[in-house]
Amino acid sequence: MSDQIETDVAIIGAGPVGLFAAFECGMLKLRSTLIDALDEVGGQCTALYPEKPIYDIPAHPAIAAGHLIGNLEQQIEPFGVPRLLGRRVDRLHGEAGHFVLGTDRGDEIRCKAVLVAAGAGAFGPNRPPLAGLAAFEATGAVRYACRRREDFRDRHVVIAGGGDSAVDWALSLKDVAARVYVVHRRAKFRAAPETSAQLDAAASRGEIEMIVPYQLHALHGAGGALETVEVATMDGQTRHLAADVLLPFFGLSMDLGPIAGWGLDIEHSHVQVTPASCETSVPGVFAIGDVATYPGKLKLILQGFSEGAMAAHAIHPIVHPGTALHFEYSTTKGVPVA
């Protein structure tokens, strides 16, 4: 069923950054509508790793990704933000103050500003080039996301990769899996220093086995059931690791989809913005979170939160031209009623 909606700000992407941007808009009495191609809010936090702990959210020493999304939903509840889910924005027409967006389900959204918080866009995993991979993917023996830790209880798990996802999940699964192997082509990891140190400590205690310097070479099993993961060094030495599940964490491939055709300045599949306002090269269109880029950009959720606040303030004069914005702290103004 299609909808016709009038709103002040159309927020494309209902991940954590998009949700917080809706809160910031609400605090400035800007009406917003969330639009997302997924059938539920939360973006990667919900779709890929709802139980993964996140350690760099202020005031939360650790918080599961799914719980973070739940808290953000609760935060915007007073504003009654409409959500168009399972919809992909494929058209943008107009100019600042008078935009019209269309979706692949025939929705028409009339808005005064557009805020792109699309994360990795239409994201998908970077798959390892292994023979017979599809058969193991079909049975879940090869997975690119971990939605429930219990799925791995008493199983032999091989994790491949050298970034935050590989390290975080190795630490998380070591307490439930029968065995956790971490395969990486070099000893140095790209993860946060603290979690890398925790990985080294867990390996020294025998809780995780480090397979370094190796890379994935082949999968062995029958009928989609994985038996061993074959790994190899650059000079051809091989090992066979007994495995029930392989988790390859080689990042996500990023596809901006129709957004790439809106005339925005694009750099390596990211949207260039002005740092102070997060406005793109198209006046009235803003971008925040992982999809946005500028000198000094850090791909952190907390930086996306900050960008959401800056963008909301920059949007205010577009929605309310000639009206001064008297900024007040939330501690003094509270949460206004929508």
Image (cartoon, rainbow, N blue to C red):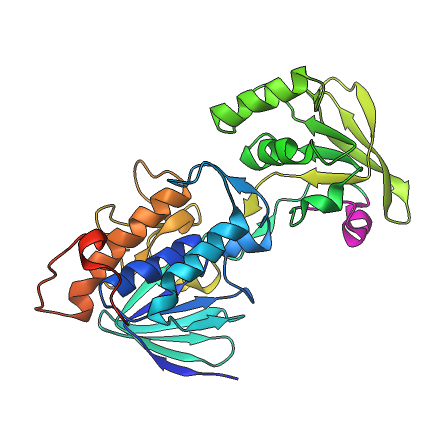
Figure check: 280 above or below 170: below
Total of numbered circles in the picture?
Answer: 0
* Residue 120 visible in the picture: no
Q: Residue furthest right?
A: 222
Q: Residue at x 52, y 29 (%)?
A: 191
* In the foreground, 325 or 294: 325
Is 35 covered by the magenta stretch? no
Q: Residue furthest top?
A: 204
* In the foreground, 35 or 255: 35
Figure check: 257 above or below 80: above
Figure check: 105 above or below 262: below
Q: Position of residue 21 (x, y in %)?
A: 33, 58
Q: Residue at x 33, y 69 (%)?
A: 79
**Range covered by the magenta-colored residues:** 132-144
* In the foreground, 257 or 149: 149
* Residue 95 visible in the picture: yes
Is 143 covered by the magenta stretch? yes
Q: Position of residue 255 (x, y in %)?
A: 51, 55
In this rendering, would 177 be left or right of 332?
right
> Quick one: quadrant of the C terminus?
bottom left
In this rendering, would 330 be left or right of 57?
left
In this rendering, would 294 be left or right of 36?
left
Q: Residue at x 45, y 52 (%)?
A: 119
Q: Residue at x 38, y 49 (%)?
A: 289
Q: Position of residue 65 (x, y in %)?
A: 52, 48
Quarter where residue 75 is shown:
bottom left
